[in-house]
Amino acid sequence: MRRVLAFLSVLLALALAFPLTVTDDLGRTVTLKAPPKRIVTMLPSVTETVCALGACDRIVATDDYSDWPESVKRLPKAGGLYNPNPELIVSLKPDLVLVSKYGRLYETLERAGLTVYAVRTETYEDIFKTVRALGRLLGLSSEAERLVAQIQKEVYGEEARAAKAKGRPRVYYEIDPTPYTVGPESFIGVLIAKARGVNIVPKELGLFPKISPEFVLEKNPEVIVATYPGALETIRKRPGWDRIAAVRQGRICVYTGGEDNLLSRPGPRVAQGLRLLVDCFHRP
Amino acid sequence: MTLALPLALRRSLVFAWLLLLLLLALVLGVALGAVALSPGEVVRALLGWEENPIVTQLRLPRVLGGMLVGAALGVAGAAFQGLFRNPLADPYLMGSASGAAFAVTLFAALLGGLSPAFAQHAVFQHLPLSATFFGFLGALLATLLTLVLAGGVARTHELVLAGVVVGSVLTGATTYLMMQDADRVRAVFAYTLGNLAFLGWPSVRALALIFLLALPPLLLLGRALNALQLGEETARSLGLPLEALKLTLLLSASLLTAGAVAQAGIIGFVGLVAPHALRRLLGEDYRLLLPASALGGAVLLALADLLARTLTRPAELPVGVVTTLLGGPFFLYLMWRRRGWA
C-alpha cells in the first residue's frame, strides 16, 4: 500500500512539475509541456549525463562525437559544433534538443518549432549543475541527486587515494602540439589539483594558453600529460626538451583513443579521468 | 631626408641599416624570451662556458630559423613582384603559398594514413624534408595554374584575380583536410597563423639548404628582372632567354615559399611588405631589391616573433597575427604616402 502511495505521489509530483518553465545556460526561457521522450543531444558530456540518469533510451540522435555509452554509437549522428545537421534533427521530430551554448544552432532549431535547451559544460561545477538541470528537465530529479552524490563519492575516493601519496609533482599538461596547455582554472586544471599535481602554468594566462617552450624547460616539470596521438615521440624529439625531468625519467603519460575524453569532458565519468591522473602523478 | 642624398650613398645606407637591424633583431631575439635571463647568462651559454639549452637549443635556432623563413618570404615576394610586374604579387596572392600549404597538409594526411589524427604530423612537428619537396610541387603547380587561368604574365588584373581564386580554393581544401581532425582545431588554426615555436637546428639546416639552392639563381637574375620591367618585347630584344629566365625565377621562388611554409606554417604580409618598403628606398633595381628584401623579411619576421613570444609571456601569440597587425597598417601607410606624393 505504501509503495502504491509512493508511486502515486511521484506521478502527482511529475504531473505538477510539468508544464515546466526553466532558464537555460544562455538565459533563455524554455518551457516543456511534458517530460521529453525524444531527445537529441549535441554534446558528448550531455549525452553521457542523460544516459547516467537512466534516460539513454529517450535519445533519438546525438552529435558526431558522442561515443559513450556504447549504445549511443548506433544512433543517427547530427554533426558537430562546426557542422551541425539541423535538417536531420528536425526530421527526427524531437521534443527536446540539448545543444552547446556556443554556435547558433539553437536559432535554426527554434525557427523550426523545436524546444531547445542550451547547456554550458566547461567547469568542474558545471558537471553537477548540468546533472541537476537535466534531471529537472527529464522529470528525474531524485535520480539526479543520486547521480550527483555518486559522482562526488567517486571523486572523493580518488582524492583520498592521491592524498596518501608523498609528493606533489610539477605537471605540464599539453592538449595539442602547438603547444597549447591548460590553466589551473580550467576543468583539466581543477582535476590536476584534485589529483595532487602542481600545474606549472600560472592562472594569469587564462584557461587554454599557447605556452612558450622555453618556459616549460625552465619550470622543468616532473610529469607531462598529453592527449593527442603521437605525443610521446613528438615531445621527446623537441629541441632541448631532453633536459626536462619528465622526459629524462620517462614520465610522459599519453591518453588517446577514448581515454582523452574522460579528461576533456566535464561529465559523469569525471572520476575515471581523475583516476588516470592520480595513477600518472603518483606512480609507485 | 634621405632622398636628398646621392643615390649610391643612399643605397649603401639602406643596406647598412638593414644589417644593423638584423644584428639588433638577433641580439634582442636571443636576449629576450619567456624566461628572463641575464645578459651574462646568455653570453656564457653562447660561448659554451655554461650549459643552457634555453639559449642554445631553443632561442638561437628559433631566431635564426625565423630569419631564414622571413628572408625566404621576402625574397620570394620580390621575385614574384618582378616576374609578374605586379606590385601586389606575393607568395600568398599568387596562390603559391596556398599551394604549398595544401600539398604539405595532404602529405601529412597521407603520412597519417588519412586518419583523423593527422595533426601529429602536420602541426609543427618535424616534418621530413620530403614535405618541403611536396610543398614545392604544390607551390609550383598552384602558380602555374594561376598563370594558365590568367592567360599569361602580361595581364595584371587577370593574374591577381586568378591568384586569389586559386589561393581561396586551395585554402578551402586545406581547411577541409584539417577540419577532419576537429579535436585539434586549435592546432590547425595555429598552423594557418604560423608558428615558430619549435624551430630547432634541424629546421635551420633544412632552410639553409633551401637557401643555398634557391638564392644564387635569384640574385644572379636581378639584371634580367630589371630588363623584364621594361616589358617582354624589350627584354627579348635585349637577347634574354625569357622563358628559361621566368622558369628559373618561378622554381626558385616556389622552393623558398615551400621551405617557409613547411617549417613555419602560413605567415602573411612579410612577402608583400618587405619588398614594398624597400622599393621605396632603393628604387626598382632588382639587383639590390632581391637581397634587400631577404634582409628586410628576416628583420621583419624576427622582430614580429620577438613580439609574439614576449608581449604575453610566458604565453605566446600566433606570429601571423603579429605580422598581419603590423604589416597591414604599414602597407596602408605606404599606399597613403605614395598617393600623397603622386
Image: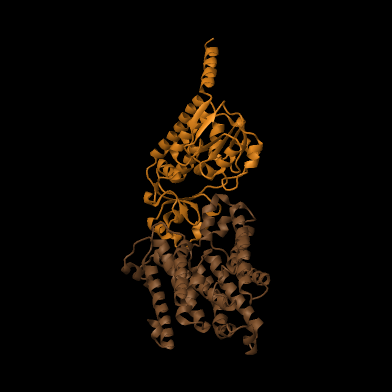
Along the line of sight, which residue is nearer the eye, A120 or B128? A120
Q: Which chain is brown?
A: B
Q: Quadrant of residue A168?
A: top left
Along the line of sight, which residue is nearer the eye, A21 or B248? A21
Toward the bottom, the furthest residue is B238
Q: Is residue A40 visible?
A: yes
In the visual, does A155 lie left or right of A91? Answer: left
Q: Quadrant of residue A97?
A: top right
The coloring applied to the image is: by chain
Q: Is residue B159 above or below residue A270?
A: below
Along the line of sight, which residue is nearer the eye, B43 or A207? A207
Measured as percent of width and height from the top left, residue A159 is found at 42, 37
Q: Which chain is orange?
A: A
Measured as percent of width and height from the top left, residue B197 is found at 46, 62
Residue beneath the point at 51% across and 73% down: B74
Toward the top, the furthest residue is A1
Q: Is residue B130 visible?
A: no
In the visual, does B36 lie left or right of B254? Answer: left
Quadrant location, the N terminus of chain A: top right
Tag count in the figure?
Answer: 0
Residue beneath the point at 54% across and 56% down: B188
Q: Quadrant of residue B90?
A: bottom right
Q: Is residue B341 above or below residue A94?
A: below
Residue beneath the point at 55% across and 13% down: A4
Q: Is residue A46 above or below residue A34?
A: below
Measured as percent of width and height from the top left, residue B99 is found at 61, 66
Quadrant location, the C terminus of chain A: top left
Measured as percent of width and height from the top left, residue B21 is found at 40, 75
